[in-house]
Image (tube, grey):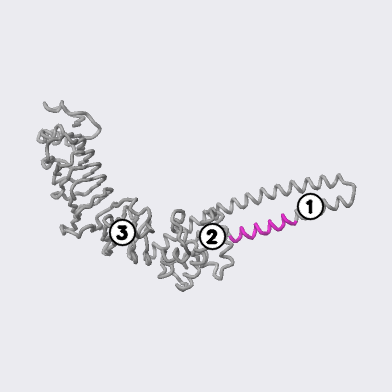
Amino acid sequence: MNCPYLPILPYESQFLIDNCDMTIESDVFNKINEINEIIVKNNLQNILIKNVLNDYEGNKIDLTSLSIESLSIQDVEKQNVDIIIPPHLKSLIINSCKASIDISKCHLKKIIISNYQGKVMDIYDDKLEVFQNNSNEEVTWYHNNTLLKKNEIYVDTNKITSFKTGYIYYFININNNNNYNNNNNASKTIIFKCNDKEIKINEVYEFSFENKHLYCSLGNIQELDFGEYTFDSFNVTSGKIKYLKVKEEEKLKLVGEEAIKKARNIEKYLLEMNHLFERKLKIDQIRIKKLLKMRDTIVCQISRKFYDNNIKSLTNDIKIRRHQNKHINVILNNLIKELRNPNGKYLISIVNDTNSLQQICSICENIGNYVIDKIAKGTSQHLLTKNVLNYCQSSPNERLCLESFMKIQLIDLSHDLPASGNQLCTSLGFCSKSW
């Protein structure tokens, strides 16, 4: 046990020095009263319990008498033992614990659980502000002292500022329906509340909410309505979501962020394209100078004509490339300007959904098939952007084609490539109901 300062009590000399306010190991659990006296005397709050090994002979560790607010439990190997937590505790952090922890008398503000293998814990959320569970074990949730159903959790963001639960490996193969069936016990039901609005989300495999940043990974959810919520960032992945609704401000923010990314990609491509043009121009100008120099050394008029034709051809090529480069610069700069304009026609039309659903679906499918084909062939992102710009120019609705491409780019296609444009657009919700 660590007690790093103040004059020692007669029995303090046996305790070890550490970095925390106090570290308690299994060899001193029989001296809880003396430990509490040290805690009170030194006004200690940050207590760590660790290294409760299999050779510990007791079956219960009663900490209810400790006058502390914060407790960490770490490296508890002893399995058949119950740890009873002080009722006035505010913060509990568990890391690698096989023992069972009893918090039934606690109304904690902060709970962080990692690699816990004990009995199911009772969580009371009336004072809860921070909750994180990276463990495979389920918890029993009490909302306003009312027991919820199994695997059901209530997240009231009016009180809870940070919430994280779930394992990332549960949905590595998120498009495989069998994956959900095999891991059905891992899924939870989240009742999510913000202000006065409440929504129930089934088949939740991972869920995190912190500082208005929301991330959730779901099973085969057909519909999800976040239309009344405001988030600073929003990320939902799902095996088969058909309808996703978000608040109008969120649509504009999400699409706007992606528009800025696309504008930057196009700017980078434009810069590289102009560098390539200047380099090619410099090479051609050097070739023309060499041809002129060689021509001036030739007396024969027939041979001089051959050099003149080559010089003329190179000069015409340069003129054509200048014109093409200027034209592409105008198109891309106009597109960049629109993408960066918060009131531009691209963003406004995406948010307002002024086009028919059938038209959106048809164009999205076409550009989706095109993008899937290019990615499957290993086309780079910069070249893909250039190809899409050319493709959309020949589309019946260039603006809607570019908008569909921007929407498609909201998801990462580098790992799980859809089989068709229809599958891609359906999974995004563009071929049932649009945003």
Q: Is residue 318 magenta?
A: yes
Whether tag 2 and tag 1 are in contact, CB under 8 A, the answer is: no
Hey, what amino acid is under mark 1? Ile
Mark 2 vs mark 3: in front: 3
Q: Mark 2 and mark 3: span between their CA atoms?
A: 47 Å
Label 3 Cα crowd, 10 Å radius (few <14 / some 14-19 / many 20+): few
Image quarter hosting the N terminus: top left
> Is mark 1 in CB contact (under 8 Å) with mark 3?
no
In magenta, the rendered stretch is 316-331
Q: Which secondary structure, mark 2? A: helix
Q: What residue is rendered at 54% in x and 70% in y?
A: 397
Amino acid identity at mark 2: Lys
Amino acid found under the numbered disc labelled 3: Asn
Where is residue 429? Give x, y as percent: 41, 66
Q: Nearer the viewer, residue 87 or 432?
A: 432
Q: In the drawing, does residue 229 fall left or right of residue 55?
A: right
Quarter of the image for residue 411 reads bottom left
* Residue at mark 2 to residue at mark 1: CA–CA distance: 38 Å
Question: Quick check: 23 left or right of 266?
Answer: left
Nearer mark to the viewer, of 1 and 3: 3
Marked residue nearer the N-terminal end (2 or 1): 1
Q: Which residue is mark 2?
A: 337
Q: In the rendering, which numbered label is found on residue 311?
A: 1
Q: Mark 2 touching mark 3, by CB under 8 A?
A: no
| Residue 316 percent location from the top left of the image | 75, 57
Label annotation for residue 420:
none
